[in-house]
Amino acid sequence: MTDRFAHTAGSLSSPATHAFAITPADGTDLPETTRAIYVGAGGAIALRMQSGALVTLSGVPQGTLLPLRADRILATGTTASSLVGLV
């Protein structure tokens, strides 16, 4: 398959090139720091930003794409599900 952009450097404003399912866990980091998080089923998301800041986002609707650099999604306080990390 041809990829016109194969030799172009990616940036945070370019499309994601990889995705992984997120299982919230209080003591486990994500396999990679995200560039965005897709929310399959709405609710609250408790997370740690790449900076180390802890935040809870309440009332996140289903189908939302959050442009966040997060390295951990906490189980405690997260009610949203079907989360996908995009990098």
Image (cartoon, rainbow, N blue to C red):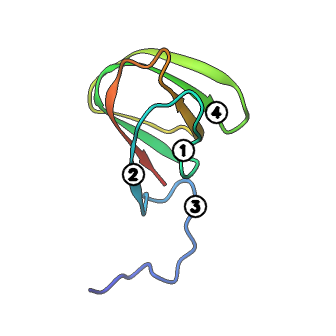
For mark 2, does the 10 Å Cα neighbourhood hold few (<14), some (14 to 19), or many (20 or more) residues? some
Choose the circle earlier in sequence order: 4 or 3. 3
Residue 49 appears left or right of 8: right
Choose the circle earlier in sequence order: 1 or 2. 2
Question: What is the three-letter code of the residue carrying label 1?
Answer: Leu
Q: Are marks 3 and 1 in contact (CB under 8 Å)?
A: no
For mark 1, does the 10 Å Cα neighbourhood hold few (<14), some (14 to 19), or many (20 or more) residues? some
Mark 1 → mark 4, Cα distance in angstroms: 11 Å
Mark nearer the viewer, 4 or 3: 4
In the rendered image, the vertical position of residue 1 relative to residue 25, given as above or below? below
Residue 38 appears left or right of 47: left
Choose the circle earlier in sequence order: 1 or 4. 1
Disc 1 marks which residue? 30
Where residue 52 appears, as percent x and y from the top left, is 72, 31
Image disc number at residue 11: 3
Q: Secondary structure at mark 1?
A: loop
Where residue 70 appears, as percent x and y from the top left, is 58, 38
Q: Quadrant of the N terminus?
A: bottom left
Question: What is the three-letter code of the residue carrying label 4?
Answer: Met
Choose the circle earlier in sequence order: 3 or 1. 3
Choose the circle earlier in sequence order: 4 or 2. 2
Mark 4 → mark 3, Cα distance in angstroms: 18 Å
